[in-house]
Image (cartoon, rainbow, N blue to C red):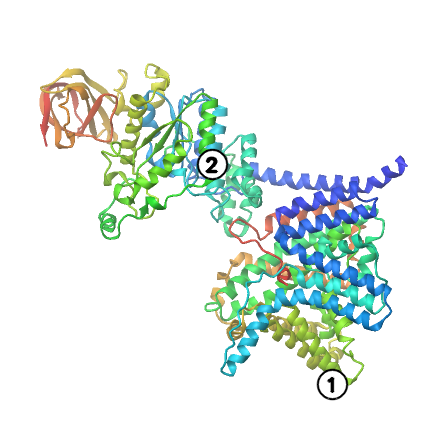
Amino acid sequence: MIFNSIEFGIFFPLAFLLYWLFFKDNIKLRNLYLIAISYLFYGWWDWRFLSLIIVSSLVDFLVGQKLGTSDDGKTRKRLLFLSIAVNIGFLAFFKYFNFFVDSFVGAFTLFGTAPNISTLSIILPVGISFYTFQTLSYTIDVYYKKMEPTNDAIGFFAFVSFFPQLVAGPIERAKHLLPQFSEKKTINYEMLRSGLLLMAWGFFKKIVIADRLARFVDGSYGSLETSSGLPSFFAMIFFAFQLYIDFSAYTDIAIGGARTLGFNLNLNFNHPYLSSSFSNFWKRWHISLSSWFQDYLYIPLGGSRNGSFATKRNILIVFLLSGLWHGASWNFVIWGALNGLFLVVFDGLLAKISKIDPRHIFTSLFIFFAWAVSLIFFRAKGFDQAMQMFGNLGFSNIESLYEFGLGESEFKFTIFLLIGLMTFEIVEEKSKNLYEWFVSKHFLLRWLLYLALAVSIILFGSYGMGLNDSNFIYFQF
Amino acid sequence: MKEQSKKEMSPLLKGLLKLGLLSAIVAGLIAYSDVKGYFNPEQANDHTKRKWDSFYDLKERDIHVDVMLFGNSHLYTGINPKNLSLTLGANAFIFASPGTNTVDNYFALKEAVKVQKPSLVILETYGLNSSIPHELIEGPLSNQIVSFSARKDFVTKLASTPVLFALDNYLYSWSTTIRNHDYLFTNPAQLKANKALIANKNLGQSQQKGLYLGRYVRFTSGIEQDILGQYETNGAPVDGNEFEYSKQNKLYAKKIMELCEEENIELLFLTLPMYDKHVSNYESWNTKLKEVLNQHPSHWINLQTMPHYNGFGAYAFESTYKPSQHMTYNGSLTATYKLANFIRDSMDVTIPDRRQDVSWHQLYYGGEGYFENYSPANNDGNNNRIVTNKTLQDVKLNSLSSLNVNNGTSRKLIAKVDKTSLPSNTNLDNYKLNLVIQYGNNGLTQNANVELKYDRFYSPRGEVIFTSVINNISVKEVVDGGLSPR
């Protein structure tokens, strides 16, 4: 089930009402209910893959239990290995099997022999990269004794499958989210209001802005033979916005939805396009994944403790693996490598520039363009298409700008929306407590905004019978 | 404890109430826009909407519909409702909507019989195909939505929604604002036109008063040489062996049969033809069609098969090599009179005979097909009946009418000859009717010979028609006449 579907529009209000009316008082019953609705939410897409979530949850719960009772280093290591093997094993098989086979065959073909290994028709289970990382964080933390293992199997299963963030994050740490499943929940109006408003804002961003950008980007990437020049340039810029708005919209809906159920999820985006450096960008972009890699890969590799060369090497390893996490293709590996290189090469220079650019205007713009360029590898289907896109970039062909999914008035409207969104982000970044300011205003003003948001989604939303269902981009990971 | 739980509930109630109020305001705004028609599509050519508007209007005018016909574009191009009404002496109405299927026909019938109960329902079988109602054709307005939107009964529409549409399309089917919201960017001219229409309070006045019975002519000329050539070189574009029907269409054909039985309405299935060279292996199609139609005892006239196909030729069909071939205006007239004859001769159905009802004649008087079926009234200043029941040399002339045509510059003579007076097995295409007429000219009476051509498209009850267009003269009498080879 995707958030921007009629099915979810029916599912969520029902799930929410039943939750608060019948399941709020008994924690065990409530968690059982959360498991049931989460499995329904996930199984709507393909119920067969629920088995993976169940096995992952079961293995990690049992490993956690055993880790809690064992002090033997070898046993503990074996248990951790078991958890990693099962979770990464699922990921490797479902996500990377064909990629590794293809790459293996390709490498041998270079030397003149082509081993006869077949690939499999494997469907990638939605959200597998997210929930495996989330459940792994639990066993790793328990292994390193950063948290106590839980004895509450129902709570743990509910933690792994919690539907608002199950398929595209934020990747929650067990330390933060798991205890919330043992808490008694009481509904409060403020939590409800802020949660619903965040959800509405997420829907607005997704349906009105991201899906409109998607039409131009898809149109342009879909006809690279004719979209050279300015259309390709705009496709590059628009995709950088589309990816951010689409993913942050999902996160807003996830955080807002969880909040209405009494759960607090972590921030996943913090105005990344206003960053002062590349390292700062990665503290603002997909925060839950960046911090996961930092805690469970970068720091165990040695982090920045062993000198400049080792630090840069560790950064590059993390970014290469982060690229591979996104997708089983060399394009994602190149994308990861490019971003690692940006950080390693440019951050020192940007630190110097910020002395003459204290507001980070040029720095932010430079980071944005570098990021947008790297995303060509992220968006293109294969290396050849990425190269074709690079070859297309330019400022000619202005006359065909409106031929790729957005007519002139809609194109201009899209630019207006982007300027509006970025202005909002700047104000939000500066003021920090925009929400508090808003809720303190007269109810007429607040209701006017609620109404404007709802009507805008309906009237200006990029949806309709002639358009394809638009999934969230990060669902594919 | 009770007091406490009441307190705990209040944030939820407060939130729900506010959310409910907000949703109601938003829904109200959308409903307001829908009712006003701000996002209506271009409606000048929306004959489906015009049909339903007209049908409800007939009810208001106390005009009873005796024969209801359901189908898709094949029906509204293949049957002429005014001619059918005139030859039956009843009121026939076509509910066909383009691109729809039997499932859609069922809900149209259900709504129609709520408003008026006919004596006879006719279902054209082209909608019995492989289409599945949930599979909408992409685009701003699918055919099924056009048909759904045109209907007016809320309860029937509500009941049909889950059958006709997938969940994702519910909102599109009910709200033009949601369905066509993209007009803001893609069709601002339509929004402007709608706004002007609303401002002028003219919305809804597109419905034509008079008598609209659901006819929609699309093709006026028959199959052209290039298409005939394609039949010779490429064979038929439609292969009956490939015909399939969906289980939904089969089921809803049965539901139509059951509904008619419950309502005590006679049901007739009608299969309109395509050009015989347009379809190969028709027997296979016919056999599969029988499987569906034999679910329940009902009448069936299949104009694609002999002897009913007799008389159809290239003139009767749209000039196309595409699989879906419609009928021309003249083809529809042939089909209409064949249908009427079948109803009269082969069905035991009681349809009200309104031929003695003056107000019924007034409805149709002077319109399409009227004078081919009835004579001008005595008080008609423009058109007049010249003779009745006159025996000529070898035929009996039931009547000769002289009609004002081409804005009074010419007269059209319509001679109705008693069929029984003609020699049997005569191919009338090879004959003409010669009449010696007497006419007035500057106070003098003169005779003239007039040749009238056989009009094969019209077959009124027991008569054949010969016509001719002559100069604007005042014809007074038929002196003599008879059939002769052309």
- Identify the subunit bearing mark 1: A
Direction right: furthest residue:
B1
Where A248 falls versus B3 (above or below)?
Answer: below
- Identify the subunit bearing mark 2: B
Identify the image quadrant of residue A418: bottom right
The residue wearing badge 1 is: A309
**Which amino acid type is shown beneath numbered disc 2?**
Val
Identify the image quadrant of residue B459: top left
Q: Give the residue at x 51% y 75%.
A: A391
Q: Position of residue A47 (x, y in %)?
A: 63, 52
Q: Position of residue B332 (x, y in %)?
A: 30, 34
The residue wearing badge 2 is: B103
Image position of B407 (left or right of B214): left
Marks 2/1: CA–CA distance = 72 Å
**Which amino acid type is shown beneath numbered disc 1?**
Phe
Q: Position of residue B67 (x, y in %)?
A: 39, 24
Q: Callout 1: helix, strand or loop?
A: helix
For the residue pair A356 and A432, the one nearer the viewer reads as A432
Q: Callout 2: helix, strand or loop?
A: helix
Image position of B207 (left or right of A148): left
Quadrant in the picture for the N terminus of chain B: top right
Q: Residues within 10 Å of mark 1 (few under 14, many from 20)?
A: few
Q: Position of residue A18 (x, y in %)?
A: 75, 42
Image position of A320 (left or right of A83): left
